[in-house]
Image (tube, rainbow, N blue to C red):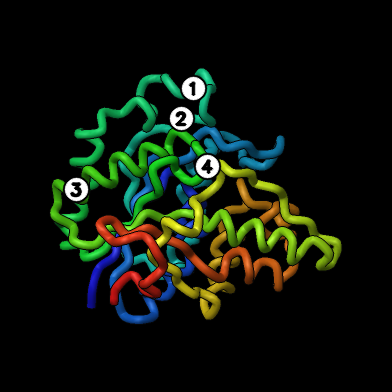
Amino acid sequence: MATMVTFHAHPDDECIACGGVMRKAYEQGHRVVLVVATRGELGEVPDGFLGEGEELWQRRVKETEDAAGILGAARVEFLGYTDSGMMGEPTNDAPGTFWTADVEEAAERLAAILREENADVLTVYDDHGGYGHPDHIQVHRVGMRAAELAGTPRVYQSTMNRDAAKRGRSQFAEVAGFEMPDLGDDFGSPEAILTTKVDVTPWVTYKRQAMRAHPSQISEQSFFLAMPDEVFGYVFGTEWFIRVGAEPGIAEYDLFD
């Protein structure tokens, strides 16, 4: 049995980016640990969604725990930073945000967990956080440094296959009247620099269930849940990574082999 620590910026990021590899690892007998940098305090919810006196972060922590149970995580930890908001917002520079965190200090918080767990695998994000969110970029910076501090042997940068997304947009433009958005050239990473392609099709239903465990952010009308099953399977049935230290080119199909 090995241990995977998967590091994310906000509640719900875990199921979108790595829900498949989490559930796959769990079913293969590995230990899965989820670490989240913030409690997603700046998410948006409709009026009346929260109970009287309930804070959004409280709801999102509970949603994370529910999703983690679906995905097989044995441990959930929050690093204690606050949500920075989208890039360029005044909230980026507020005291206590993850974006303003000292990288060395934050990395040591994560490294302490990596050491406790004797982690074999760590997942972080690519160097632009997939789409430029400041907290996602900081996950990359902090996660990479934490792996160095803890000596974690295998580090994978979770990303999206930009070229596959473009192919899929064309392929599914006419399916059930569903049109995937054009995410542009700043989304994900080009296929040529990826190293690892994990088929998570057998676990994609768990991934969708975990998304539904985050109703404060992922409604049934959202892009993630409104798409037909066929499209969902194409978009979320493969998870893509860049393994640190590996040569570019897809040559791996599992995080533990």
In primary-sequence order, the first of circles 3 and 1 is 1
Q: CA distance from mark 3 to mark 4?
A: 25 Å
In primary-sequence order, the first of circles 1 and 4 is 1
Q: CA distance from mark 2 to mark 4?
A: 15 Å
- Tags 2 and 4 touching, CB below 8 Å: no
Residue type for callout 4: Tyr
The disc placed on residue 84 is 2
Measuring 31% from the left and 29% from the top, which residue is drawn there? 101
Q: Residues within 10 Å of mark 3 (few under 14, many from 20)?
A: many
Measuring 50% from the left and 53% from the top, which residue is drawn there? 190
Q: CA distance from mark 3 to mark 1?
A: 27 Å
- Tags 1 and 4 touching, CB below 8 Å: no
The x, y position of residue 249, in whole percent, is: 40, 64
Marks 1 and 4: which is nearer the front?
A: 4
Residue type for callout 3: Ala
Q: Is residue 46 visible?
A: yes
The x, y position of residue 95, in whole percent, is: 37, 20
Left/right of residue 72 with respect to residue 147 in the rendered view = right
Q: Is residue 75 visible?
A: no
Q: Residue under circle 1? A: 91
- Tags 3 and 2 touching, CB below 8 Å: no
Residue type for callout 1: Thr
Marks 2 and 4: which is nearer the front?
A: 4
The x, y position of residue 189, in whole percent, is: 49, 51
Q: Residues within 10 Å of mark 4 (few under 14, many from 20)?
A: some
Look at the numbered disc 3 and give the secondary structure of its residue. Answer: helix
Q: Quadrant of the N terminus?
A: bottom left
Q: Quadrant of the C terminus?
A: bottom left
In primary-sequence order, the first of circles 3 and 2 is 2
The x, y position of residue 177, in whole percent, is: 86, 62
Q: Residue under circle 4? A: 131
Q: Residue under circle 3? A: 111
